[in-house]
Image (cartoon, helix red, strand yellow):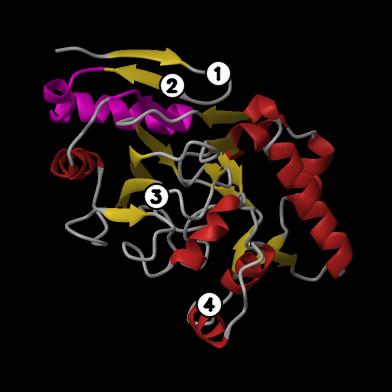
Amino acid sequence: MMFEAFALKDGIGSEIRTDVESLLTAEVAAKVRRLLVERGVVVFKGLQLTDAQQVALARLMGSVRQEGENGIYKITLDKSANDRRDYLKGSFLWHIDGTHDEVPVFASLLTGITLSTTGGQTEFANSYGAYEALPQEMKAKIERLKVVHSVEVSMRRADIEPTEANLAFWRKFPDKTHNLVWTHKSGRKSLVIGCHASHIEGMDRDEGQKLLQDLLDWTTQPRFVYRHEWTPGDLLIWDNTGVLHRVEPYPLDCGRMMHRTTLLGEEAFA
């Protein structure tokens, strides 16, 4: 049974080297999950999993969200394959998936199928590590703050046209309020921030937005970020509960296609 892991950066990310047969065993999948929680992102270069194998791995790691076709959701700006093309442009900004829910998704598995010749790199920022490195004065300042998260705000920040249809879709998701500092069941703490963070409750809007931007700038500085240069067949898995992510912009007509499988959340924002 083959399994090797190598740190990609001190603060985030590990590359795992294994074969598909080993990966699709309960023993190795459990190792992957433990490393994912510890390192935030795990990378399998050129693994070339089939859709069925990707979903099988996901089921060994948690509960699969039913989306797309048999657990595979196509991430693409090609309208013939995804009718929510505009919505996906929001992924160009730093975000956490599911802040409009009480329980965000735990993790996502993403395989590169067709790549863009320019742009399309994916970046991940370790929110656990960023919080831990904050000065004590800042930790004390933000410990009890609550942030309102808005799908509409995130879409407007992504410069997506607020058409009548888009506004109706965005407003299907009510604003949600979460603690700025998420204290997890494990005892670890992370920052719940991103393009969807509209404002801080009870704070002057300008002051609150400056604080949120300062925290986002802190979290996304290079020491906390892993940037992935895709090659066909790469598989990435990231812990959505402690990692922010974004994709670098790419041409809308390039045909870039990624296949995603999502693991249901296991812990509510708290």
Q: Residues within 10 Å of mark 4 (few under 14, many from 20)?
A: some
Residue under pointer 4:
170
Local secondary structure at mark 3: loop
Q: Residue at x 48, y 25 (%)?
A: 13
Q: Position of residue 86 (x, y in %)?
A: 51, 67
Q: Is residue 197 magenta?
A: no
- State the separation of the CA atoms marked 2 and 1: 8 Å
Q: Residue at x 66, y 66 (%)?
A: 159
Q: Say if residue 102 shows up in the picture.
A: no
Labels 2, 3: front one: 3
Q: Residue at x 66, y 35 (%)?
A: 130
Q: Residues within 10 Å of mark 2 (few under 14, many from 20)?
A: many
The answer to whether mark 2 and mark 4 are in CB contact below 8 A is no
Badge 3 or badge 1: first in the primary sequence: 1
Q: Residues within 10 Å of mark 3 (few under 14, many from 20)?
A: some
Mark 1: amino acid: Lys
Identify the magenta region: 18-46
Q: Quadrant of residue 59?
A: top left
- State the separation of the CA atoms marked 2 and 4: 35 Å
Numbered tag placed on residue 180 in the rendering: none
The quadrant of the rendering that contains the C terminus is bottom right
Labels 4, 3: front one: 3
Q: Say if residue 50 shows up in the picture.
A: yes
- State the separation of the CA atoms marked 2 and 3: 28 Å
The quadrant of the rendering that contains the N terminus is top left
Residue under pointer 3:
255
Numbered tag placed on residue 9 in the rendering: 1
